[in-house]
Amino acid sequence: MWLGLFIGLAVYALFGIAPAVGNALISVSNYSGLIGSHTSFIGFHNYLALFTTQRPGFISSLTETLFFVVGVTVVQNALGMLMAHRLQGDTRGASLLRILVFLPIVLGVTVVGLIWLFLFDPSTGPAADALRSLGVQSAFFGSNSWAMPLVIIVQVWQNLGFTMVVFIGGLRAIPRDVYEAASLDGISRFRRFTRITWPLMAPSVTVNVLFAVIGSLTTYNLIYVLTTGLYNTNTLGMFSFNSAFGSSADLGLGAAVTTVLLILTILVALPVASLLRARERRILQ
Amino acid sequence: MTLHDDNGLFRNARRVYRASGAALIFVLFFIPIAYAVMISLESGTHFLNHPLVPQAVPTFQNFSAAWSQGDLGPELLNTILYSFVAAGISTALSVLLAFPISRALIKGSSALYRSFVIGICLPLPIIPLFVESRMLHLFDNRLGYIILHVEVGIPLGVLLLGAFIGSIPKELDEAAWLDGAGYLKYLAKIIVPLAWPSIIIIFLYSMLGVWNDIIGPIVFLATPSLFPVTRGVYNFYGTNQSEAPLLAAAVVIVSLPVVALFVMSQRQLLRSAMGSGVRARPNEL
């Protein structure tokens, strides 16, 4: 009778809990995963290496992560809100556009990444053609200055559908009579948004901001497809993956980066979550 | 000066603004996808000479070339096997876990529940999972790849289902148990049919997660005949970078199954996303 529960818990313990503990263990070792190599306990050496000059990529990885997280969170939520406002209706056109905007989520990072690599191919892509006519040339995803902004744009493009649909849910949950009462008072459209719509959709703002912050902090699969972390796009997750599975094959160092990312995620997500929840309570009580 | 709704000039301006917003959204989301489809129907020479003009008589040569050169057939079969089996097991285990946890039938239910919430928000510890896959002989084989992907969908599955099961009155359990219905029979006959819409959503999201995973196949697989389409197409890109039409054909082929699935399930997927930003009980998270 409890067999299913037992299997479920075993799977969770084995592939959910054990790796979390295992990560801490690996991070204090020099494990390389290569056959025949000797593994030993090296204390906090990996962590010290990160913060000293032995690993110069780490500090720039921190700033790249910051840039990516702030960029994605701001752009995704601002555009998501604008588009939700435009496409919240029940018309046929709006619902078809909603499906189109949601499509990149279903297509997945590999397909989406390749589509944008075609568009921004430095020699054959249409973006290069358009810029060449303006006298500008760029390697786009292979350029130190262009890669990060482009990666942010593609990440937002891929996830905007979800953000928008969550905001539409928030907009539709606002009771009609609130607006009717406001229209009797004759307030302007701008104030109708700032005084009614924005505060009353607080739960969807919480969900979307947290999703964007946590998602952009912890995922790197799209970055892998677009740049593999080169050209100033080596965010912490990407940095961890590259340390462990790149040519250095340093699993210990990669695990140490994951621990740093884990702590950073907690340090960022918890205050953001409690601020947003406090805001919700203040409004909805 | 205030804007009045009955002012014809402003109303027209607003209508134009609204239509242009929708048109802009259409362009931003349709053009990248349409471009990939367009060049997939062009011959190599046409693409190089007129990259932005669709070929008058489309060629399907790229599709047959991509299909055979890219091993897309076997890779699609691998992807279908991995994603359907892993998502099926994951969804079944989510049901078997969500019910006792949601009903607090086991000790530590709320701690478990909380650990699932935290688990969703933290970075996936890919390095210890790689080490585990080597130790447990799950590395580079089909069964292992499936087992490694079962856990990923469980936390979200338990949270979504747990919330739904919480809304099914407990009296129903007690009545059924008094009637002598067994635990599994009760789950299968009463809970599963009631929770069916949520179960479909959980299945779809975990399936999409496995289907679109690109990091997993790179870390857990080494033999090309085991590769799913994500890694297959990504490798195909690496070796044929200069032949965008051929690559675009591969991208279109591997996207067709997910797009078909999405067209069938878009209503449910969008509705569930819409509900996630609407909170009935603001003091929970």
Image (tube, coloured by chain):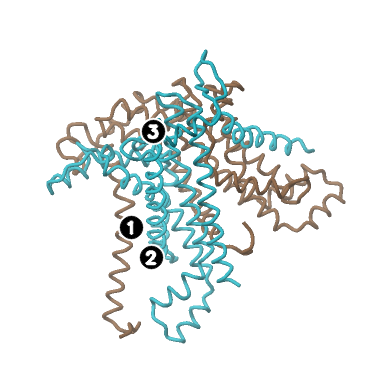
x, y percent for residue B246: 29, 31
Label 3 element class: loop
Mark 2 or 3: in front is 3
In the rendered image, the vertical position of residue A24 relative to residue A218, given as above or below? above
Give me the disc on residue B25.
1
Label 1 element class: helix
In the rendered image, the vertical position of residue B21 relative to residue A227, given as above or below? below
Q: Look at mark 2 in the image and give the residue it sits on.
A: A86
Q: Nearer the viewer, residue B171 or B110?
A: B110
Q: Total number of numbered labels?
A: 3
Q: Chain of mark 3?
A: A
Question: What is the C-alpha distance between the residues marked 2 and 3?
Answer: 50 Å
Question: What is the C-alpha distance between the residues marked 2 and 1?
Answer: 9 Å
x, y percent for residue A198: 46, 69
Q: Please say if the residues under marks 2 and 1 sit with CB atoms less than 8 Å apart.
A: yes
x, y percent for residue B274: 51, 58
Chain A, hue in figure = cyan
